[in-house]
Image: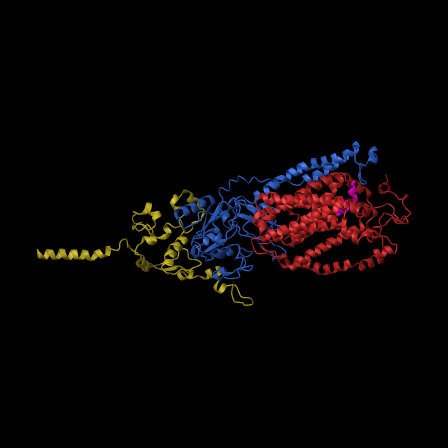
Chain colours: A yellow, B red, C blue
Amino acid sequence: MIRNLTWHIKGVLLLACCLFLALPAGAMDSPEALTIDTLADLYQGVEFDHQMHVDLAQDCSACHHHTTGTGTIDLYCARCHDSMEEQATVACQDCHLADPFSAAAIQAKGETNHFHVDIYGLKGAYHRNCMGCHEQMDGPTGCQDCHARTEAGDAFYHSGKFAPLAAGATHEEH
Amino acid sequence: MKYLEQEGIRPLNAAVKKNGKQWNLMEKLFLGLTLEQYVSQFIRNKFNWLLGIIFAIGIPLIIYRFIFGLGAVTHGSYDYPWGLFLGFGLFCMVPLSASGFMLGTTVELFGRHDFEPIERLALLNGLLGYLFAVVYLLVDLGQPWRLGYPMFYSFGPAAVLFLVGWHVATYLSVQVAEVSTSFFEWIGWPRAKQFVRKGAIGLTVSGIILSTLHQGALGALFVYAPGKIHPLWYSAPFQWLHFFVSSIPGGLCMVIVVSTVVIKTMSWRCDERFKDNLDKLTLGLAKGASMGLITYLVIKFIAVAHENEWVYLTTGWGAWWLLEIFLGVLVPLFLFAYGIHNKQVGLVRVAAFFTVAGIVLNRLNTALITFNWKLYQEVPHVFEVIISITIFAIYIATYRFILNRLPILYAWKAQPVEVTVTETVDEKTPIEADQELVGA
Amino acid sequence: MSKLSRRRFLAGSLAGCAAVMAAPAKNALASGNLAGFPDGMGVLVDLTRCVGCRSCEAACNKEQQLPAPDQPFDDYSVFDQTFHHGTQKRRPTEKAYTVVNRYESKLSDKPIYRKIQCNHCNEPACLTSCFVGAYTKTKEGAVIYNSKVCVGCRNCMIACPFHVPAYSYSSATDPVVKKCIFCYDTRVKHGKPPACVEICPSQALVFGKRAELLKIARERIERHPGKYQDEIYGEKEVGGTSWLYLSGVPFEDVGFDTSLQKEPIINNVKDFLATVPMVLAIWPALFTGFHLLSTKGKKHGEEDQHAEKHEGGEQ
């Protein structure tokens, strides 16, 4: 009998050890780091430290709204989405269109749910979502703080080596 | 010319010479003087020296403007697109050239043939004023070679400027026709003159229609910019009336001013009919101008009352407006009233100068000085000033050229008239002289 | 007057009047009840979102193939530039169809940025003042310009209540108006958003149907009470513009002209333009009447063709 009890205790202890793994609610398979480069062109992709943000935010819905089954912090959206379960995907680009002003997207707006008509496009979503916290918590707010410019970007902004010349000076290429 | 007169030499005023031969065109151009006489009197005239200096500086600048563009000679900017070329050359010269339709109407329509001696001068004043307004416009337009576009290529009929363009073009033709009678007399084409005279009433009526509309339209142009012109100079419903009504004393007083200049500087060219009647006619013109001025005064105040702008009169701009009204309307009104009542032609002439200055000030205020009154003030470029003066000098030179030759200030005769003390009975009357010319 | 002279007189008057009537009749535009352009597009500019990055200026420069700027587009010292003794900030020029300016307001601890460009009015003053019809309001809402017919009168610059059109005074052979054309030829005509909207990282600019944008703007105001001024600039100004603005601080604080009339500019000239055909129609009879009334039986002048002497019909 004592031999059976020991096995049960080990089993419970084993289970107990596993419990702490379940504690971070909705942690799922959250990546440590990722590169956000869906729209990369004038700027390089963002090397995003996801784990750091997980630790800072504590609440997934701070960035992922209501897709992680953890409720939502936006009172406006909470009316419908507070008790939503986890979605199959929490990636931004699945709800925020990369091209929000295409003819098709504008056409679709006419048929869209009234409450979703003013959703950000992907670029706007990235920036608006991040900047709010960054401004409050002294995070990076400059353009190149998060993503360095490419050469195409330098040309676009007439900056760096493409900067307008001072009178008389010359430089190579172009 | 005074020197030549002392010598007994007279400029030609008739179709044939004393010896019965016809003058030819070259001789007519040189006023019947020999080349030597003409050149020496030309050089003696100090005014020509002044003109020479102005042309020496100004004409190269005009060429410079066309090579290097408007940006090189004006302070034309995105906020201040219009400068002196339009502000003075167009907006000031057009109301002062209203004399054409005023005197045309007076003589042809209302039958006041007592104004005939001065009618041709008024018509010429109108024609040259409009012609040179177009010259100023050509200097101001970004692409003057496209001036004809709104006439036949691309229409924007809802625009007030479209109306202005069409009317000025049509009215110029009317005025050319009206002045052409003197030209045909001078050149010796009597049938052409007859042909034009047949349509005199029609031309005059067209002239009134066109003038009413485009004088008003120039005012309506500013109604496109309600916030940009100071409220005291702006009135959405009445702007066109202000411009139209002020053109009446403007045109009449310009005739007084020009006739004053003419009688003082070139009285040798004026015949007895002109000289004898001028004072009386000046008083008559002054009566018309006074009525125009008092009406203008009233409608200006009506506009202020209509928009309840009285409080603006207490500001700096208000003081400026009151000064414009004082100098341009009140002073002339008093001078006219006194001068007409006491038959003092000198006072009346002074009043006319004040009126002309007042019109110029009003148009410059509306187009330039109070324009963008909420923004920084803009000052014309010195080159712009010089070019404006130069074009005005060309206008004066052209004016003088025509007055010297065409029968504007004098009546054209079939035979030269000898003005001696004894001769009165045998002198042919002008109508009979014309009849001989025509062969009726 | 003899019958013969009267005929000539009438012929002359009619000839004169015909010359006047030949001028094209003015179309009195019925703009009092314009239903608007139902499919017209617009842009909603939310000034609480603009961060002053100037990417829109760079995008416009590239899309419209404008000359290289004097400073790089990421040079933010331009916000300190002033002109005319400090009375003006930057404005659109012949080389820059859009600019962003920075403003300070007591009601905001952050600076506010405003993008300035042609507002593509529903009833553009530039269009109505152009006597060669160089401007067109397309059905997509863009107000575009045809430099091939422009004579350079610059009346559009006088008329525009927003002081938008710039002019290339520097050119002697082909000076033309320069302004934002809503990227019509390259984008909007094909249903794509203008370059500035596409590049904006903070979605301060939203492109869509003007009617929809007004709804979105009202929704934003309602949804965030206190965040926005309860007004959409451009909804009614000078008859309504395609570019609409939302602001967190009073519009005067960020350089908008709030004294503009709500009616289209053309309304100011409509009454005068309507007078034109009336004068054309009434003056001939009126003044011919004056002539007949005032000259009957009067002595005729020297020049007069129907002087009493010729009553016998010698002419």
Q: Nearer the viewer, residue A23 or C273?
A: C273
Task: State whether residue B229 appears in this view.
Answer: no
Secondary structure mostly taken by the magenta-highlighted segment of the chain: helix
Magenta residues, as a range?
B113-124
Q: Residue C8: x, y in percent?
A: 77, 35
Task: State whether residue B210 appears in this view.
Answer: yes
On the image, which quarter does residue B388 sit in?
Answer: bottom right
Q: Nearer the viewer, residue A122 or B81?
A: B81
Q: Residue furthest left?
A: A1
Name which residue lies at 76% across and 41% down. Answer: B107
Q: Residue B355: x, y in percent?
A: 69, 49
User: In the shown orientation, is residue B153 left or right of residue A63?
Assistant: right
Q: Residue furthest top?
A: C3
Q: Residue C239: x, y in percent?
A: 52, 44
Image vertical order of residue C102 relative to residue B204, above or below: below
User: In the shown orientation, is residue C102 left or right of residue B418?
Assistant: left
What is the number of callouts on the image? 0
Residue B121 falls within the magenta-colored stretch? yes
Residue A67 falls within the magenta-colored stretch? no
Q: Nearer the viewer, residue B144 or A93?
A: B144
User: In the shown orientation, is residue B338 left or right of residue C179?
Assistant: right
What quarter of the picture does the C terminus of chain C occupy? top right
On the image, which quarter does residue C1 sit in?
Answer: top right
Name which residue lies at 41% across and 42% down. Answer: A111
Name which residue lies at 54% across and 66% down. Answer: A166
Q: Residue B54: x, y in percent?
A: 72, 59
On the image, which quarter does residue B43 sit in?
Answer: bottom right
